[in-house]
Image (tube, rainbow, N blue to C red):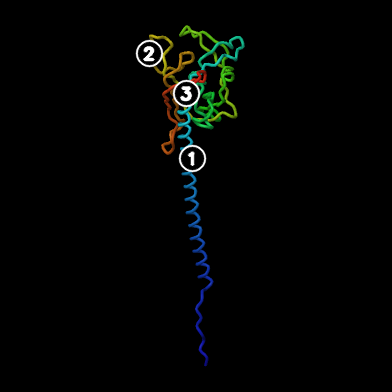
Amino acid sequence: MTRARSRAGVTLIEMLIAVTLLSLLTLGMLMAMRVGLMAYSRTGDKLMENRRVAGAQRVLESELMGLMPVTPPCTGVPELAGLHFNFLQAEPQSMRMVSAFSLQEGWRGHPQILEFLVIPGKEGRGVRLVVNEIPYTPTTAGKACQGTAQDPQLGVTVPVFAPIQAGPTSFILADKLDFCRFSYNTGSGRETDPIAWRSAATGRGWPHGIRIEMAPIELDPSRLQPITVTAPLFLHRSLEVPYEDK
């Protein structure tokens, strides 16, 4: 008689169970990887947004601190071309100035005419702060002068500036703001009045500092928020004054 050999093997049910367990394990690993990648992506997005906010704050402060005291001719009105004026439009919601700081080249670039403006936000939600940057020349700056007017409070003649317009090339410095307003540390124009933070400074000389107050529409502790920027002004060299080494 021959003895039947015993053969070890795997049944079909055992194979199906093994394949099912392996599939579940693989699916669990993929889900875990997906959750991890999504968390990594969200963290990266928050870091990039925080960097943009911090970078915009530094740029804004540098632009303000780079103010240059230029006095171009009023070429916007031909009959006033011989009149030189302080190139500083300082209003509560708009500001025009010349700065030694450039968005593209930092402190090493050519002086720029900066036009700050508060405009409505996307879909009318809140407001945003934008800036136009234009290379400075006396003629270009002078075209912003649209004449002169008598200041009823000071009783002196002040320049009248053309309105600032936002366009496709305007750079957004801050967005989704509940409010944004400018103030200037200056005198009123009268010798007897003290220096204080005022909502306007056009025609009142060069201010000692500029403040841009802003607050976000929605507070989010997990993200950097736009905050008020206060920049002391240390007036840089004037482009109208020649300098040379002796």
- The residue labelled by disc 1 is 48
| Closer mark to the observer between disc 3 and disc 2 | 3
Residue 148 or residue 14, whichever sits in front: 148
Point out which mark residue 245 bears. Answer: 3
Point out which mark residue 65 bears. Answer: none
Local secondary structure at mark 3? loop
Residue at figure coordinates x 41%, y 14% from the top left: 187
Local secondary structure at mark 1? helix
When asked about the image quadrant of residue 224, the answer is top left
Tag 1: amino acid: Met
Q: CA distance from mark 1 to mark 3?
A: 45 Å
| Closer mark to the observer between disc 2 and disc 1 | 2
> Which residue extends farthest front?
246
Compared with 99, 37 (above or below) is below
State the image coordinates of residue 57 (x, y, percent, origin top left).
Answer: 46, 31
First of labels 3, 2 by sequence position: 2
Q: CA distance from mark 3 to mark 2?
A: 38 Å
Tag 3 near tag 2, CB within 8 Å: no
Residue at figure coordinates x 49%, y 50% from the top left: 37
Compared with 35, 182 (above or below) is above
Q: Residues within 10 Å of mark 1 (few under 14, many from 20)?
A: few
Tag 3: amino acid: Asp
State the image coordinates of residue 170 (x, y, percent, origin top left).
Answer: 56, 28
State the image coordinates of residue 192 (x, y, percent, origin top left).
Answer: 38, 9
When asked about the image quadrant of residue 223, the answer is top left
Q: Residues within 10 Å of mark 3 (few under 14, many from 20)?
A: few
First of labels 1, 3 by sequence position: 1
Tag 2: amino acid: Pro
State the image coordinates of residue 173 (x, y, percent, origin top left).
Answer: 50, 30
- The residue labelled by disc 2 is 194
Question: Is residue 94 in view from this perspective?
Answer: no
First of labels 2, 1 by sequence position: 1
